[in-house]
Image (cartoon, rainbow, N blue to C red):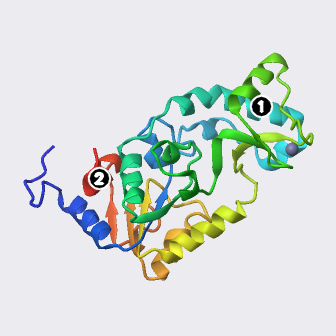
Amino acid sequence: MITGGDPPMNLDRDTAALRRLIDEAERIAVFTGAGISTESGIPDFRSPGGIWTRLAPIDFEAFLASEEARREAWRRKFASDGMIRSAKPNRGHRAVAELVRRGKAAAIITQNIDGLHQASGIPEAQVIELHGNTTYAHCLDCARRYEIDDLRIAFERDEAPPLCVGCGGFVKTATISFGQPMPAEAMRRAEIETRAADLFVVLGSSLVVYPAAGFPELAKHNGATLAIINREATPLDGLADLVLRGAIGETLGAAVAID
Ligand SMILES: [Zn+2]
C-alpha cells in the first residue's frame, strides 16, 4: 500500500486525523453496526442479496401468533448458527476493545447481535446491545436463559419450538425482531453514553435504521465531535466532522496502533 510517506508514523492523512480526534477525546462513545462484523465473515443481513432480502423476515407478531412461524424461526437460527459460532473478532473489534481498556470508551453501543465485542474481551456490562444477542435464548415471559446447543438437541428430535420449562412461555433468541419493541434499558444506557461523550465514533453502520441512527445525531447536537467510518455513504455524513470510507480494521487499527 502506498501511504505517500506521510509523517508521522506512516499514517495516511485520514487515519492521522482519526488518531488525533481519539487522542484529544476525554470520553468516546463507540457505535457499531454490521460493517465491523462483515470483516469477521458475518454477512450484513440487510444488505442487497443478504438473506433477509430472499426470505421474508419473521416479525415478532407472527412469532407470537403462530407455532409454524416459531418453528421456521428456529430452523433458520440453527441453519445459520455455525457461521455465527465460527466467527472471531477482527482487528476492528480489537481496536475498539483497546479503547475500552485505555478508559477512553466507557461502553460500546452496538446494533450487532453476534457477541463479538464480548469475545474481543470487553466485559459484558460494557456492551450495550440495541438489537439483542443471538448467541443465547431466553423465555419471553420470565426471561430464563437458555443455551442454543441445548435447544438444538431438543429441536432436532421433533422440531417442536421450545417452551420455557419454568413457566411455559415461548423461548426465542435474545434478539430484537422486526416489530418487537426496542429494549428500554439498552436504549436508556445508550442515550446516557451518547450524552456523556465528547467524541462519537460510528463504525460500520449505514445509519438508516431508527431509533438507533438517532444517537449520532444526538451526540452532534450535544456538542460532540462525530466521526463516521463506513464503506458506503450515510445520511449523516454531512453532519460529521470526519468521514472515512476504508475498512474498519485497517483504519481504526492503525489509528489506535493495534494489529
Ligand atoms: Zn419462562
Q: Does 224 appear above or below 73?
A: below
In which quadrant is the N terminus drawn? top left
In which quadrant is the C terminus drawn? top left
- Where ligand 1 lies, by image quadrant? top right
Instruction: Name the residue carrying label 2.
Output: 251
Q: Which quadrant would residue 100 be assigned to in this image?
A: bottom left
* Numbered disc 2: secondary structure: helix
Report the residue at 83% width, 44% height from top.
Answer: 62
Question: Tag 2: Cα neighbours inside 10 Å, few (<14), some, or many (≥20)?
Answer: many
Label 2 vs 1, first from the N-terminus = 1
Q: Which quadrant would residue 130 be assigned to in this image?
A: bottom right
- Measure how far apart labels 2 and 1 are at the Cα level: 39 Å
Question: Tag 1: Cα neighbours inside 10 Å, few (<14), some, or many (≥20)?
Answer: some
Amino acid type indicated by mark 1: Glu
Instruction: Name the residue carrying label 1.
Output: 72
Q: Position of residue 147 (x, y in %)?
A: 71, 34
* Numbered disc 1: secondary structure: helix
Q: Does 151 appear above or below 48?
A: above
Q: Is residue 15 left or right of residue 83?
A: left
Q: Position of residue 170 (x, y in %)?
A: 86, 41
